[in-house]
Amino acid sequence: MFAEERRLKIADMIKNTKSITVSELARTFGVSESTIRRDLQFLEDQGYIQRTHGGAILQHSHYEPTYLEKESKEAASKKEIGILSSKLVKDGDTILLDSGTTTLSIARNLKGKRITVVTNSPVIAMELFTDEDIEVILVGGIFRKETRALVGPIAEKNLKEFKVDKAFIGANGVALDGITTPNIIEATTKRVMIEISSQPYIVADHTKFGISTFVRFANLSDIAAIITDRNVDLKWVTSFEEAGTEIIHPEKG
């Protein structure tokens, strides 16, 4: 078993059990305790877990709402984010739209723009396919029913073939110590989205601020800005901008 595969399985075990010891993991995987300690150090550095004396625990929430649950929440906020984000897109751009209900709102505001859209969302691809001005590229991958997203190694390999001008990426948590999502595979795919984009934007409504979920996929230094709605608490706007991250919201224009 390769180290990457073992680490993913370790993270999944901790997600399910909430805590585990080094000795348990060493027995499970048939490797030395020093190897497990290196694995845990790697997972902690990535923001997946918190190491403890003799083991590790799950530090952040890993609850993941379903696509249908998200679809019915904060509709007005997502509409605002969709309008704001679309204003950043110019004719001739190649953009990336992450899967999600917020990015779907962006897609609905792109009609008539002469652009290319790369996406891992079949829902977004179907939303845009009738617009003759928009070229749509849908990547392959593992289909996650929870988010209706194509993710995993195939999606990442497909994405690495491209270089996009702007990426609009969803998140479950937006905090000063990083941008997070509850799922490891989704996090890895989102990291690739950031890597291939000249200007990666995080799109998140006001309820996501101050939240940290299971996996950190970006530091603030990795992104161009965060796009949100008018209900964002201004204390967050101030805190993020003091940390050097621009917050784009309707009150700011």
Image (tube, grey):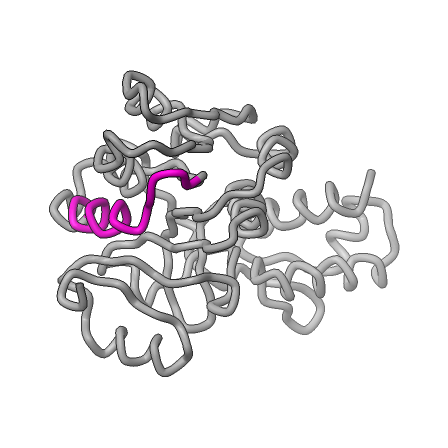
**Residue 80 among those drawn in magenta:** yes
The spot of residue 202 in percent (x, y) is 38, 55
In the rendered structure, which segment of residues is drawn in magenta?
78-93
**Residue 225 among those drawn in magenta:** no
Instruction: Determine the residue located farthest toward the bottom in the rendered image.
Output: 242
> Could you tell me which residue is drawn at 35 percent across and 26 percent down?
134
Front-most of residues 153 and 130: 130
Q: Is residue 26 among what the camera can see?
A: yes
The spot of residue 249 in percent (x, y) is 21, 62
Q: Write down the quadrant of residue 37 in the picture.
A: bottom right
In the visual, does 160 lie left or right of 212? right
Q: Write down the quadrant of residue 21 in the picture.
A: bottom right
Image quadrant where one finds the N terminus: top right
> Could you tell me which residue is drawn at 38 percent across and 34 percent down?
115
207 versus 158 height, above or below: below
122 versus 248 height, above or below: above
> Could you tell me which residue is drawn at 74 percent across and 45 percent down?
4
> How many labels were placed on the picture?
0
27 versus 178 height, above or below: above
The spot of residue 171 in percent (x, y) is 38, 51
In the visual, does 173 lie left or right of 113? right
240 versus 88 height, above or below: below
> Could you tell me which residue is drawn at 19 percent across and 46 percent down?
83
The spot of residue 253 in percent (x, y) is 17, 63
